[in-house]
Every structure is written in structure tokens, then in C-alpha cells.
Amino acid sequence: MVADSPYIKEACLLCAEVCTWCAKQCIQHEHDHCKVCAAACSTCAEECRKLVA
């Protein structure tokens, strides 16, 4: 982003997609660390989408 890459939008959207997928996978498990991961991934996906909005 600092270098004003022409691919930043695509990179952010891919990151959001991967994080959303991960959150969906982790939320299916009862382990505390999976719930923490799901929450972190959901937050990351939301922030990545904000960057390209």
C-alpha cells in the first residue's frame, strides 16, 4: 500500500476471501482457540473490505 501497488485492491479482496473462508471453518469447532481464530479472521476480512471500499 505504501508503494501504491496497482494490485492492492485485488490483494485486499483475496485476503478478505481467505479470512472469511477460515472463519467459516473455525467457527464449526468448539475449541476456544478456534473461536478466537474465527473472530480474528472475521475482523481481518471486514478491515480488508473497508480498505477497498
Image: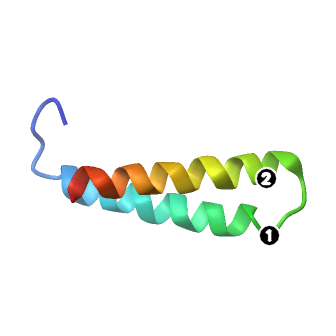
Residue 47 vertical position relative to residue 17 in the rendered view, above or below: above
Instruction: Give the total of numbered labels.
Output: 2
What separation in Å lies between label 1 and label 2 (alpha carbons)?
A: 8 Å
In-image side of 5 versus 13 (left or right): left
Q: Position of residue 9 (x, y in %)?
A: 21, 56
Q: Position of residue 21 (x, y in %)?
A: 57, 67
**First in sequence: mark 1 vs mark 2:** 1
Crowd around label 1: few <14 · some 14–19 · many ≥20 (10 Å): few
- Mark 1 touches mark 2? (CB < 8 Å): yes
The N terminus appears in which quarter of the rendering?
Answer: top left
Return the residue nearer the eye: 37 or 18: 37
Label 1 residue SS: loop
Residue beneath label 1, please? 28
Q: Amino acid at mark 1?
A: Gln
Q: Residue at 24% of width from left, 60% of height from top?
A: 10
The C terminus appears in which quarter of the rendering?
Answer: bottom left
Residue beneath label 2, please? 34
Label 2 residue SS: helix
Residue 22 vertical position relative to residue 37 in the rendered view, above or below: below
In-image side of 50 versus 29 (left or right): left
